[in-house]
Amino acid sequence: MTVLLTLTVLALIAIAIWQITKIFELSQTPKVNTQVADDDDNQLNGKLMFAFLIFIYALTLFSFWKWGDVLLPDASSEHGADYDNLMWISFAIIFFVQTITQALLHYFAYKYRGEKGKKAYFYADNDRLEAVWTIIPVIVLAGLILYGLYTWTSIMSVEEDEDSLVIELYAQQFNWKARYSGDDGVLGDANVRFLQDFDGKNQVGIDATDPNGFDDVVVQELHLPVGREVIFKMRSQDVLHSAYMPHFRAQMNCVPGMITEFAFVPVTTTSDMRQNPDVVAKVKKINKIRVENSKALVANGEEALEPYTFDYLLLCNKICGASHYNMQMKIIVETPEEFEKWIANQQTFAQVIQ
Amino acid sequence: MSTAAQVHEEDHGHHHKETFVTKYIFSQDHKMISKQYLITGIFMGIIGIAMSLLFRLQLAWPEQPMGVMQVLLGKWAPDGIMDPNVYLALVTIHGTIMVFFVLTAGLSGTFSNLLIPLQIGARDMASGLLNMISYWMFFLSSVIMVCSLFVEAGPAAAGWTIYPPLSALPQAQPGSGLGMTLWLVSMAIFIASSLLGSLNYIVTVINLRTKGMTMTRLPLTIWAFFVTAIIGVVSFPVLLSAALLLIMDRSFGTSFFLSDIFIQGEVLHYQGGSPVLYEHLFWFLGHPEVYIVLLPALGITSEVIATNSRKPIFGYRAMVASILAIAFLSTIVWGHHMFISGMNPFLGSVFTFTTLLIAIPSAVKAFNYITTLWKGNLQLNPAMLFSIGLVSTFISGGLTGIILGDSTLDINVHDTYFVVAHFHLVMGISALYGFFAGVYHWFPKMFGTMMNKNLGYVHFWVTAVCAYGVFLPMHFIGMAGLPRRYYTNTAFPYFDDLANINVVITIFALIAGAAQLVFLYNFIHSMFYGKKSPQNPWKSNTLGVDSSC
């Protein structure tokens, strides 16, 4: 069926293109065709240039109207607010420049379309004009660079203090694990050489000779207490992975053979985020789509899709092999009390290897 | 005097006695070599574009069996559903072919060879022999790359950047076996070919300019080709070294890029290497490569816009200065691909600074093109339309670079579809438009016949609409947080609402693909049956229009 549809669509497209070609040909008055643009071509294509300008604007507006709701909701981390702010400033500048330059480009292409006998205006140089459009970008970019670097430095300077929670994110083909440092607040040494110890129970390769490691907790689901700084130490056991947490505006590669770092303060719990109007609207839309898709599945005798509820995501964002597209972990942001209760119920490394 | 004249006569006599093999196959004539590059480039382009259509089909209708997959991919698409490894392989080879084989060799190889001797008033390239060897090495590397598609376990599939350890370990994915070896061998030969070509261009431009053709009178096309060749000579050897070190890691047990790896239940012996080192080496070429692709397209555009506006290009000296500035900056910005690679954040600050500086010469170029149109007498030939289209996509794609070049903003859009949309517009589509502009503009010079203009118009307008139709919505997918190189987004219910955007993109992509068939037909048909062209159909005034090919 799909094949037939695809073929039909392709055939229709081919016919459409052939027809357009015919229109172009027929719109020409019969005369010697030199294959060089004449007045008619200049007229037609000049006007199409103007139409194209409108097309670019219309497509942009249409996309925002139709798909504006797929964009990420407000950031759920402390630095994320600065990030979003910088993003909107950059976007404002981009839209301003885009609107004006595209207008000039296409309008000129329309306005000055060629005509027989017309003479072009000789205008080869103007140093003042050149200076203007060199200096304006310089000033704008200087502002953006300074603001950007200020934000970058504040995001990337990780300072561990007593209150911060240290978590190791451990990547492998094709899943994530998280290791909490336990009561002592220190992650035990680890290396891939120890992965086979204790009949494979040593899931992230903790060094059993390091006393700091025994109270470490290894889990498959990431729980974060709200309002407390979380310092992530990333490791990978096989190939490059990237820990991408889009809702927190956070990402860092996991590199075999080295430990990378990223830190942020989550500010919205999962349950609060589920109440966020943007998220509610998005979830509603997604569930509508899932109900639609389920109808087709049920008709084929398959099970219907589960309704979707919002959860924060950790995704792999560096190509890592066949199941790269499905390498994920759920993130749950909760109150400190809920977090303490949850972590107390997990098995420590010492308990696991007993 | 008379002896010199005699020698000259003999030279010409010799040319007429060429055999079929020396004239068409192992030719040392720059014009024939340029045609060889053009046709090989177009052939590779067909493969590259066809691959993109296949994976676009997969992205739009991820769970539906499609006959076309079964026909084209055979056992790699059981029941007509593409295998995830094959998806990654297609993405990888699409990138490699389009960036290197089409937009580097196909674009630079064709037009540098054709135009440098013509526009500087030289008889041929400095070394015809090197030029011939350069083409045939490119041909060999193309053959190897195409052969790698037929390997049992599939071609390279680690992304066109082939980051180790994924690309280094056959255990990590099937494509990292023989397919990756062939990829590396093919690229090593390609780089050698590119270096020979570039050295030849540089030597020719410096030494063989005709009397009175000073550097400050050099056409902007030649400036662009010349500077492109210099960037190539500076940066390609670094990629070669990265490829060689990766071959050593793969085949001889060294640990340049590998350390502490546990895979498929065993600890590997590698110690002390770093994948980040590879990233540095790769992007030291990888970023300048963007300009190796783009500058020739901008050079062609300068010539086409000036000719068809019936005006000199506005601000010649500023244009040359911005080409030089872009070239210089392009070699010190590679780290913006690595903001979150684990390299020191301070380096990130430095690379943000240098990267955003590139916006300044780029803005100067865009404004100068626009001013060249102002009060012109625009002859809207197909080549002119593609040149104006190039300026449009160069602006649209370039502006989002302000976001990606900013280390802070890069954190959340890095490696998402936002990046894919950005670089396809600014270097993919722009460079392709430059390529098409060049073909439509110099086809009469190359083949002595005219291309059909109406087919050219259809080709441009359909492509222009579809290019925005594909890549503008793609920004939204990226801003929604969807990573690139995902076989499907159905593993995340959170992304379910992106499905219909993907369908829209794929439909535009299919139409754009169909539009390229119009070009292909026009190209081949005009070559044999086209109307005979006059000496100077576009009324250009650069050197070279009066010489016959």
Image: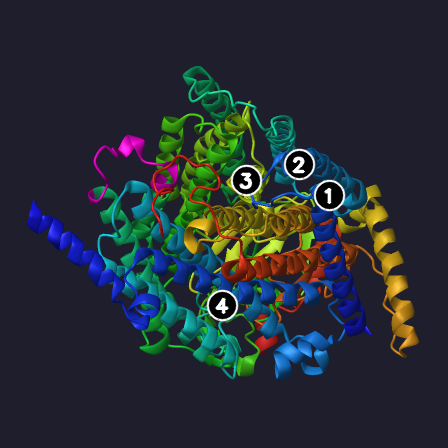
Q: Nearer the viewer, residue B387 or A343?
A: B387
Write down the region rendered in magenta.
B207-223
Mark 1, Cα crowd under 10 Å, few <14 / some 14-19 / many 20+, is: few
Report the residue marked by disc 2.
Answer: A40
Q: Amino acid at mark 2?
A: Asp
Mark 2 lies on a secondary structure that is: helix
> What residue occupies the far front of the structure in this picture?
A31
Query: In whole angstroms, how far apart are the C-alphas of marks 4 and 1?
Result: 59 Å
Q: Respond whether the residues carrying marks 4 and 1 are from the same subunit.
A: yes
The chain holding disc 1 is A
Residue B279 in view, yes or no: no
Query: In whole angstroms, how far apart are the C-alphas of marks 2 and 3?
Result: 15 Å
Mark 1 lies on a secondary structure that is: loop
Task: Tell me which corner region of the image, top left, top right, bottom left or bottom right, holds residue A7.
Answer: bottom right
Q: Respond whether the residues carrying marks 3 and 4 are from the same subunit.
A: no
Task: Tell me which corner region of the image, top left, top right, bottom left or bottom right, holds residue B46.
Answer: bottom right
Of labels 1 and 2, earlier in sequence is: 1
Report the residue marked by disc 1.
Answer: A27
Q: Do the residues bearing badges 1 and 2 touch, measured as CB atoms within 8 Å?
A: yes
Query: In whole angstroms, how far apart are the C-alphas of marks 1 and 3?
Result: 20 Å
Report the residue marked by disc 3.
Answer: B384
Q: Quadrant of the N terminus of chain B?
A: top left
Q: Amino acid at mark 4?
A: Val
In the rendered image, residue B217 lying in the magenta stretch gets the answer yes
Residue at 31%, 66% in the rendered image: B23
The chain holding disc 2 is A
